[in-house]
């Protein structure tokens, strides 16, 4: 390992820079570093940044800064572009390529490896996992997810207090989370719920089609019993008779979102109550105040260990988390083949976690950085809009 | 003072319960406490909660819990309703009434006082300030605002890092804040900006009509120089030739919002770039992770001091903050007459703060609880969509 090229790809997270810093601090003493800006686009268009002392120092100062400091992005990686990427790496004299990213990133990384073999170039490729959606296969979880899950769970807990206080004015809030085709984030919204009257009262995940009758039944019951209802829905949810809602298609990739507005309209029409939908915001993946200490630590470790393994000769692998026992979480890393990651594809929320949320929460809690907030129960006072919904 | 009735009104904040706790802990040893649920609606419809030991304990356990634990809400306070409110207080044997709230709350409190005089009832009324919008007159600022300002400033700082990383995919984000007719919150979004390339690049406040040309000029310059642009707009902003945008009217009160979507459409059309608008979310007023330690402390003090002053015989006043010197902030409280608060009306962001943001930030910083986050500069790398905007 003489010259290492490093890039970040896909949507940023609050801890993706920690992974970068862990890697750079591990490899910088033994080899030259070449930073790739703007993800795979930068690899193809030669947006390189030489890892001189000042640049290394600038990069490593981002350990606790959200966003991807090298620049990330989305990019449609054509065959031509892959050929160009390898040509560029050869020109730069790089013998190792690291990319931090999710499913698409790992797939692209393997393609680069295959093209390098074609071109007779010796190129080591190593993937470092990152995703707030937690939809990356062949790993127990990925850095970025713990912080995003904490963000969503804390947001919903606080928003429930806010809405409950305003229930003579506004009775229902529909909160839409990220997650793409996987329900991990939306389902995490219930992990801090301590009392039955607290929200969320209904959670919709993309792994199950949304049943209008069931939604209505649960929301009505919450209004009857507590005077308000908090619904959480993942951006990738489909109605029982519908398809995913796409806000836009950019670089061939669908940007999902909008199901919360449809649920708002449906509940308004059915219940004649005040309903407001809200997207939880892009800071699900960038909020610095909600970073999980465990997630931050693990993100750094993924980078550090990836660097160590590269020194030991690892190739075309992704650094992955293994959980050996459910009861007593201990972070443990192992290498998995990129082929296996890609073969597994997008990983949804398992049905046992959907059917038994408590088992999901037990799995999730160690990733949230501890310090679960505790709030007293809500006042069990009179409910006002009861009569309206029979 | 033998029996004290206490209520919360208007939109909740992350620290309104701290004020309630400060007050209750101060008065509970000397008098009976009667809690009014659901704001003025509860006063009229007799949603009272006896302050027995268990209830006092339940209330005081909310010191660090967002939302208004007694229930708040909005309510159109008619003459008939005011008469009923006073009758109810008389029936309960209450001789003192505290309400925690903003402009509307103080106005209602004075009306209750006047009605009590009419009915020959001796009733002491005291207002405790609360507003995330900071539009309450006769006080330097109000509890709730510091935490909301920190929320907005930190959100925008983090979102800027996220967007900058994605600028080959999405170039402009338009973030809409709360604030009603006042620009305090939107203007606070710049307080953590350390480097010219960081967002926000343009801030629109309701005190000034929004000029399309100026908006376009600044956004174009940011795209040219940094490759991306973050626009922050207050919900109450009007176009140069338009009116405020109302999402809904509930209980005769306009719920503002939607200007960010219009700005999104305008910038998309003009620049042919990828633009996304986002509402910063209801947790501007309820986010527990963004509470300012100073704000939390001051909120408690407002309640405690209000209780002390009531014991000393104060009447028809609001507890208010005074700032004696700009350089060396020290929290200082004084009573102001409710008439003066009402006479001053909604307080906008002063023009000297709009013209000289640094003077506003100097005024604002002591309220944010310290710990201003520091991020390194952004990479000064190539800018991609430059050619599109000439």
Image (cartoon, coloured by chain):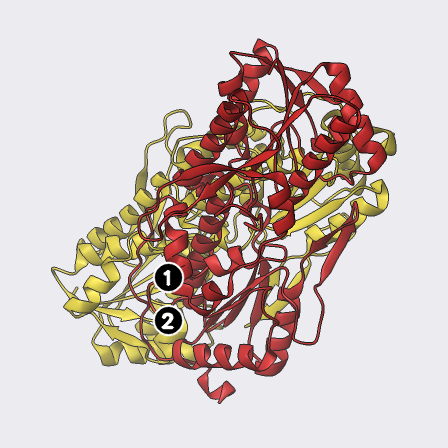
Chain colours: A yellow, B red
Position of A7 with respect to A187 (left or right) is left
Q: Between B51 and B197, which is closer to the camera in this rendering?
A: B51
Q: Between A266 and A386, which is closer to the camera in this rendering?
A: A386
The residue under the point 51% across, 86% down is B389
Please report contact status of discs 2 and 1: CB closer than 8 Å, yes or no. no
Query: Which numbered tag is attached to residue A194?
Result: none
Residue A114 image position (x, y, % from top left): 36, 69
Query: Which numbered tag is attached to residue A68?
Result: 1
Q: Residues within 10 Å of mark 2 (few under 14, many from 20)?
A: many
Q: Quadrant of residue A368?
A: top left
Q: Between B213 and A295, which is closer to the camera in this rendering?
A: B213
User: How far is disc 2 from disc 1 in space, using C-alphas?
Assistant: 15 Å
Q: Would residue B302 be visible to someone looking at this image? A: yes
The residue under the point 84% across, 43% down is A272
Q: Which residue is mark 2?
A: B197
Count of numbered labels shown in the rendering: 2
Q: Residues within 10 Å of mark 1 (few under 14, many from 20)?
A: many
In the image, residue A215 above or below residue B362: above
Q: Would residue A189 be visible to someone looking at this image? A: no
């Amino acid at each position: 390992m003489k010259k290492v090229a490093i890039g970040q790809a896909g949507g940023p997270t609050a801890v993706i820079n920690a992974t970068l810093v862990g890697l750079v601090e591990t490899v910088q003493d033994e080899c030259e570093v070449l930073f790739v800006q703007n993800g795979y686009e930068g690899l193809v268009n030669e947006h390189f940044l030489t890892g001189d002392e000042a640049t290394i120092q600038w990069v490593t100062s981002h350990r606790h800064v959200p966003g991807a400091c090298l620049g990330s992005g989305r990019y449609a990686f054509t065959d031509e572009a892959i050929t160009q990427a390898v040509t560029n790496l050869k020109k730069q004299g790089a013998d190792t390529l690291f990319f931090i990213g999710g499913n698409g990133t790992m797939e692209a990384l393997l393609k680069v490896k295959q093209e390098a073999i074609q071109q007779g170039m010796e190129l080591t490729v190593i993937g470092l996992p990152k995703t707030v959606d937690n939809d990356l296969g062949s790993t127990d979880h990925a850095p970025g997810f713990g912080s995003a899950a904490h963000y969503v769970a804390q947001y919903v807990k606080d928003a429930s207090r806010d809405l409950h206080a305003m229930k003579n004015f506004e009775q229902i809030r529909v909160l839409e989370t990220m997650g793409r085709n996987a329900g991990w984030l939306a389902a995490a919204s219930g992990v801090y719920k301590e009392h039955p009257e607290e929200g969320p009262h209904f959670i919709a995940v993309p792994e199950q089609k949304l049943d209008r009758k069931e939604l209505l039944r649960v929301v009505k019951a919450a209004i009857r019993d507590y005077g308000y209802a908090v619904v959480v829905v993942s951006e990738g949810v489909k109605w029982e008779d519908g398809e995913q809602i796409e806000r836009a298609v950019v670089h061939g990739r669908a940007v999902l979102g909008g199901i919360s507005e449809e649920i708002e309209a449906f509940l308004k029409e059915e219940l004649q109550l005040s309903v407001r939908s809200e997207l939880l915001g892009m800071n699900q993946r960038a909020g610095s105040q909600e970073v999980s200490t465990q997630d931050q630590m693990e993100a750094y470790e993924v980078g550090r260990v990836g660097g160590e393994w590269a020194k030991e000769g690892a190739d075309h692998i992704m650094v992955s988390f293994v959980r050996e026992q459910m009861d007593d979480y201990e972070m443990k890393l192992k290498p998995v083949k990129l082929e296996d990651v890609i073969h597994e594809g997008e990983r949804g929320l398992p049905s046992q976690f959907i059917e038994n949320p408590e088992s999901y929460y037990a799995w999730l809690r160690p990733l949230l950085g501890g310090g679960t907030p505790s709030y007293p129960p809500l006042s069990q006072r009179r409910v006002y809009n009861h009569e309206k919904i029979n």
